[in-house]
Image (cartoon, rainbow, N blue to C red):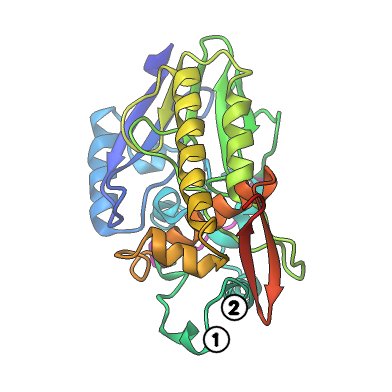
Amino acid sequence: MEKEVYRIVVPTPFPVGDVNMYIVKGELLTLIDAGVKTEEAWQVFQCQLREIGYEPSDIEQVVLTHHHPDHVGLLDYLPDSIPVIAHPKAQPWISKDPKFLEWHQHYFEQFLVECGIDAAFLPQLPKLRRSLRYSCERSLTTAISEGDRINGMEGWAVIETPGHAQSHIVLYREKDGLMIGGDHLLAKVSSNPLLEPPEIGTWERPKPLLQYNDSLKKLLSYDIAKIKTGHGEDVTDVPELVEKRLKKQHERAEQVLEMLTQGPMTAFDVCRHLFSTVYEREFLLTMSETIGQLDYLEHIGEIMKRKENDAYVYEAVRW
């Protein structure tokens, strides 16, 4: 049955490298994820699609595992008439909702001051949304969530797996244990739980690393034979890899805890120590990693935070 699922690999301008897209032959010809918006990706996509006997006009619907630019960009090359199906939290990102983007900027300016960044330095930071030029400007046709079935994809169920993105879902076919997993669990590299703002007008932000850990553990309740991933090769040893990822993440958190036993630090202080050579270039990525470890340590009771002036300071509890 796996012959019904075809992988298409297109290049991206991002450090992660190539991204995987999938064609699923069912009642409707379905594209899972839509690459990145570059002319090179579009040409490669068309070439590989023709190799399996199809043209872009044959695609009858697109399902997105999440909203990141390297998974949605080619929607702008596909006909507007093709339905787009994803988690509702993908909508403001893929449509580039102006109110949401304004809120994104406003929220993170306030949040980064709380992380210990001098407000005077904020204009010098890399644009937090610079990667969106590789995204798309489309709207959802259908919103899907936990347990939903997708028209034209008989036997596939939707499983919510927030963490890497708030909109992240995977598709699972129980009859043969096949999963199309987006970026949730990758074979060779850890998936980064990325910071996102809360819903417009609310200030309680999601804690993506805690969500991601829960979503990883959620996989253990399914009989998964293989995960077709968003980057790189398939994953077949799911329980072993989940445990490996969770163990590695705990070890990284212990490194942060060791730093905090030397004295209180802001999140930005921790980020600069952890990623001294890359934090300026990969600011959102490194801050997401840092905040994730701090959220985790706070969650398990190893650290606490207190506000000093405008910023939060973290300190180890037992030292």
**Is residue 253 in view from this perspective?**
yes
Return the x and y of residue 288 as percentages of the image width and height: 51, 57
- What is the magenta segment's predominant secondary structure? loop
Please, what is the three-letter code of the amino acid marked with disc 1? Ala
Does residue 59 appear left or right of residue 161 in this picture? left
Return the x and y of residue 57 as percentages of the image width and height: 39, 42
Q: Give me the C-alpha separation between circle 1 and circle 2.
A: 6 Å
| Residue lying farthest to the right in this orientation | 202
Please name the residue shown 62% across and 56% down the image.
Answer: 91
Return the x and y of residue 286 as percentages of the image width and height: 43, 59
Residue 159, by quadrant, is top right
| Residue lying farthest to the bottom in this orientation | 120
Residue denoted by label 2: 113
Judging depth in this view, the residue of 146 and 108 nearest the camera is 108
Is residue 125 located in the magenta-colored stretch of the structure?
A: no
Query: Does the residue at mark 1 contact the one at mark 2 (Cβ under 8 Å)?
Result: yes
Residue 115, by quadrant, is bottom right
Return the x and y of residue 281 as percentages of the image width and height: 33, 68
Residue 51: give its label. none
Q: Earlier in the sequence, mark 1 or mark 2?
A: 2
Residue 119: give its label. 1
Please name the residue shown 52% across and 78% down the image.
Answer: 117
Mark 1, secondary structure of its residue: helix
Question: What residue span does the magenta drawing correspond to?
Answer: 133-142
Is residue 141 located in the magenta-colored stretch of the structure?
A: yes
Quarter of the image where the N terminus is located: top left
